[in-house]
Image (spheres, rainbow, N blue to C red):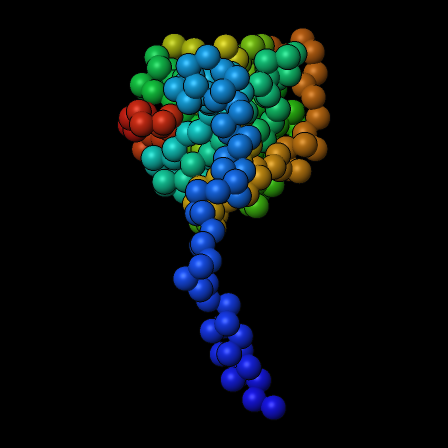
Amino acid sequence: MDTEAQHTERDRSSRPSDSEQPSDPEGPEDRSRSAFAGRITDWVPGGRITVTLLVLLLFLLLSTFVLQPFQIPSGSMERGLRIGDRVLVNKLAYRFDGRPQRGDIVVFDGTGLFGHGDYIKRVVGVGGDHVVCCDEEGRIRVNGQSVDESAFLYPGDRPSTVPFDVVVPDGTLFVLGDHRADSSDSRDHLGSPGGGMVPLDVVIGRADWIVWPFGHATHLDRPDAYARVPDAETGGGEASGAGAGSAAGAGVGAGAARAKDADG
């Protein structure tokens, strides 16, 4: 039996004759695909224009109060965050009695502190912490606990080439870039007003996800090395920090307006 020939004959017989009418391409099936959207626009005064404006308003509210994308314009947070990466910043992370924790990657407004624009750094010390560089093995020590940062430091970088010994004031953060040789951070501003510390009220949020490029997309976890650091003992006095050498700055851009890089 010639199966292919049978298919050919069946195809011929299925063609509409002159007396048959072809189906209407604009019939009920086509209309049903957009029926739900059509009902919404029918219910809302102003139709499609109003629905479009409401959707744009929803995205604006989410970006303003919940999640905001930022672009990485420099290499100060390599190896984890590369130039051109887009990260999603959780703006609610610290809004309900939550505070940045050691190891968090935060975005903050560095105007008047590190330069102009928004910056992204890793939290090394929180209010009350005693942060020292460095121990006998060259590691940063927080509250007496040496921190192994090898899992995220840029390959070949030392935790710091500049010694410092500071107590972080309450309500502020001591922050460093993961690419220590290419980051303008708290070390570079110890002698400036504010002592290189970042006030909590200028923190925009916590960077939780790399969302672009897709091949590099990942969740940004808090390193275990910082999770093991003990809390600071109460009543500690402030220590003076050593000066730091200059390094390239690192800002982040939001939407179309990219933040400027600043020199340390």
Residue at (62% x, 24% y) in the render? 101
User: Compared with residue 213, is residue 92 higher up or lower down, i.e. above or below?
Assistant: above
The foreground one among 33 and 54 is: 33
Quick one: quadrant of the N terminus?
bottom right
The foreground one among 232 and 56 is: 56
Number of marks in picture: 0
Task: Please state the horizontal and vertical placement of residue 128, each as a whole percent of the image.
Answer: 61, 15
Task: Please state the horizontal and vertical placement of residue 70, each as a whole percent of the image.
Answer: 41, 29
Task: Please state the horizontal and vertical placement of residue 162, each as a whole percent of the image.
Answer: 43, 32
- Is residue 22 visible from the viewing direction of this image? yes
User: Compared with residue 193, is residue 252 higher up or lower down, i.e. above or below?
Assistant: below
The foreground one among 39 and 256 is: 39
Residue at (57% x, 39% y) in the render? 219
User: Compared with residue 171, is residue 63 higher up or lower down, i.e. above or below?
Assistant: below
The foreground one among 14 and 28 is: 14
- Is residue 165 visible from the viewing direction of this image? no
User: Compared with residue 225, is residue 128 higher up or lower down, i.e. above or below?
Assistant: above
Task: Please state the horizontal and vertical placement of residue 178, each as a whole percent of the image.
Answer: 47, 37
Quadrant assignment, res 36? top right
Residue at (70% x, 33% y) in the render? 228
Residue at (49% x, 79% y) in the render? 8
